[in-house]
Amino acid sequence: MNPQQQSLLYLHSAVLLFGGTALFSKLIGLPALDITVYRTAVAAIVLFILLTLQKQKVTLASAKDYGIALLLGIVVGIHWVTYFASMQMAGVTIGIIAFFTYPVITVFLEPLLARFISKNKKSSKPKLKDIFIALVVMFGIFLLIPEISLGNQVTLGIATGIFSAFFFALRNILHKNYFSHYSGPHTMLYQTLVACLMLCLFVEVPPMDVTDNDWLLILLVGVVFTAMPHALFASSLRHLSATTAGLISCLQPLYGSVLAFLLLSERVNMWTIIGGLLVISAALFETWSVSRGR
């Protein structure tokens, strides 16, 4: 197996594991915030051990980087809590589809933040095709909504998923501009640690009251579905372009939906499939388009 083939295997494995993360919102009998706290605690410990065994530096280069790490941890903590909450309310498949509005949100959010974070202080307006894609995504999301009321759990879950997508897009933009000189495991160590410390004061179920079964699932999601895929994803980029990684990452909703069907017997109707295809197609197109500079 040549390096490119091995990197593709790493990448698909990472995306499969990322897709499987959503299942734990249903498998673990805890609130979304509690799942996030315990998951990030486990992931932070594993990532610290991984970096230590690889004899990589754990510290950051400057005081400014610690401030950025703090901000990224807060943003990613909000993203993870709302991500799991979305799955718990709307189901895994619909929740993942709602979350995958983030590539389109990124296209609109990045120009708005450009004058604050970019060195050239220039911002660009979204192109006509971006507006069209955004309308396609809005229509796809509309097809997912069973009832236009936040009193409906599925509708509220979709709204929460889009909220999570916004914070994920924000995290990616900040990381790209301020923190991309660190490796994936190094970055995630600080993000998981900050997210855990930020949210631990709000835990509803203390560690001693968590069941043995839930602890096993928390260890599984923390090690296999958080620390491992981030390490695999970072390793895959050594021999693959960011374009390839971005496009293959759009398979995450497919992997997550298939796993939800096989393991949770979660079924969806035809409107969900059509809406999902519209949203994921838009995400694929935007990822490809942005990577080609169009």
Image (spheres, rainbow, N blue to C red):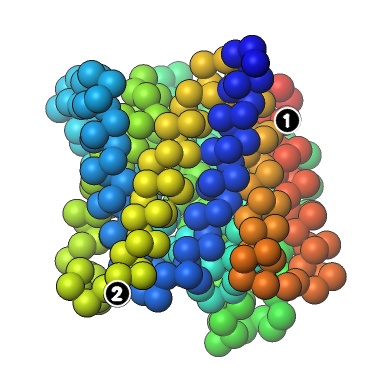
Pointers 1 and 2 in contact (C-beta within 8 Å): no
Quarter of the image for residue 11 reads top right
**Which SS class for mark 1?**
helix
Which of the marked residues, 1 or 2, is nearer the chain's N terminus? 2
For badge 2, the amino acid type reads Thr
Where does the N terminus fall, quadrant-wise? top right
For badge 1, the amino acid type reads Ser
Can see residue 279? yes
Can see residue 135? no
Q: 189 and 227: which one is in front? A: 227
Q: Residue at 29% of width from left, 31% of height from top? A: 50
Q: Residue furthest left?
A: 63
Compared to 233, does 211 lie above or below? below
Q: Residue at 72% of width from left, 31% of height from top? A: 288
Compared to 256, does 26 lie above or below? below
Q: Residue furthest bottom?
A: 151
Q: Is residue 53 left or right of residue 132?
A: left
Residue, disc 1: 289
Compared to 179, does 127 lie above or below? below
**Category of crowding for the residue at label 2, using alpha-carbon neighbours closer than 10 angstroms: few (below 14), some (14–19), many (at least 20):** few
Residue, disc 2: 211
Name the spot of residue 61 as percent of width and height, x first: 20, 20
